[in-house]
Image: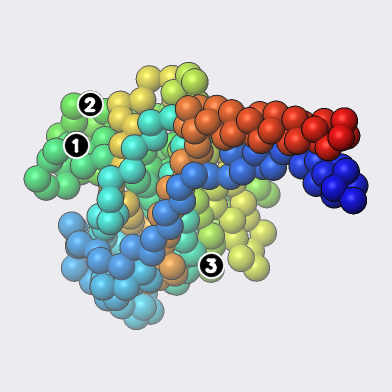
Amino acid sequence: MNTLNSSICFSRFSLAGMISVIFGISALPSFVHAELLDSWTQYSGSVSSGLNTASPVLGNGNADSESADSQTIYASSSMSYTLADVGDTVTLSAGVTFTGMVSPQSDQFRFGFYDVNGQPGATGWLGYYATNSGTSTGPTYSRLWERDNPNTGSFGSGAGASLLAWVNASPSNTAFESGTYSFSLSATRVESGLDLSWSMIGTGLIYSLSGTVVDTTPESYVFDRVGFFTGGGLNADQVAFLDVDLTFSAIPEPASTNFLLMIAAGLFTVGARHHKMFSDA
């Protein structure tokens, strides 16, 4: 009877099973923190509402007012997120609805996450921001920018920023128009630096863009701010955000994974000895 129970126990906790469980656990993030950003500061412009919610609104929505233009807002995260280990990721995501746009220009909507870099105001920050596509006398594609170190510009301006990558929208850049979109920007720590990706996809609209680039010389691995900018050429009566979210995830450190594997090996050894003892009895 004892031999049968021991065999069943050992078969259930075989080496393959234990290793599968351990690797399954180690593949999961050891830490995930998602937060809705609901405390916004108006840096430029003044026509806004809902700054104490995760769904701030720029502009008053009045027809032909273009009151959502030239607005800049930012929010602080509840903690400073450092992409210290390979696999650590920070992601900004939200929905946004543009109302009353007329011939929107490219680069006039900008969304990013930043490192305040010890600065007391909203200038001199480090980090990244992405843009919409659209029509313009200049480039029509969506672009990803990195803030230079040092810089004296505001976080949403082109001054003090370097272009990292650009992509065209599908089916065309000029398909960007009034309507609802989802957008995201993420950075993942890799061996060579930061793997960055951004996207903007129409909801009920035939419009999408996405891009990726690896920044091998990041100015910072720390992020603690999120910011939005609407330029004077956006020509929008209102820009309404929905559920602005910043999520940070960290994978287990190698030492933690090794510790789990050591536990699995130890359990297997004990189980094997226990099985042999009853088999020999």
Quarter of the image with the C terminus is: top right
Q: Which mark is residue 117?
A: 1
* Residue that label 2 marks: 149
Spot occupied by residue 74 in the image (x, y as percentages of width and height) = 26, 56
Relative depth, front residue between 18 and 152? 18
Question: Mark 3 packing: few (<14 Cα in 10 Å), some, or many (20+)?
Answer: some
Q: If you read the primary sequence from the N terminus, does the residue marked by circle 3 or circle 1 appear first?
A: 1
Spot occupied by residue 202 in the image (x, y as percentages of width and height) = 59, 60
Residue 222 as seen in the image, left or right of residue 15: left
Secondary structure of the residue carrying tag 1 is loop
Distance between the Cα atoms at labels 3 and 1?
Answer: 33 Å
Q: Amino acid at mark 2?
A: Asn
Q: If you read the primary sequence from the N terminus, does the residue marked by circle 1 or circle 2 appear first?
A: 1
Secondary structure of the residue carrying tag 3 is strand
Residue at (39% x, 35% y) in the render? 83
Q: Residue furthest bottom?
A: 62
Q: Is residue 250 above or below residue 183?
A: above
Look at the numbered discs 1 and 2 and tell me whether their residues touch, using CB distance below 8 Å: yes
Give the number of the mark in front: 1 or 2. 1
For the question of whether residue 146 can be seen, the reply is no
Q: How many marks?
A: 3
Residue at (46% x, 41% y) in the render? 250
Q: Which mark is residue 180?
A: 3
Q: Amino acid at mark 1?
A: Asn
Residue 15 as seen in the image, left or right of residue 97: right
Question: Mark 2 packing: few (<14 Cα in 10 Å), some, or many (20+)?
Answer: some
Distance between the Cα atoms at labels 1 and 2?
Answer: 9 Å
Look at the numbered discs 2 and 3 and tell me whether their residues touch, using CB distance below 8 Å: no
For the question of whether residue 39 can be seen, the reply is yes
Look at the numbered discs 3 and 1 and tell me whether their residues touch, using CB distance below 8 Å: no
Relative depth, front residue between 213 and 205? 213
Q: Amino acid at mark 3?
A: Thr
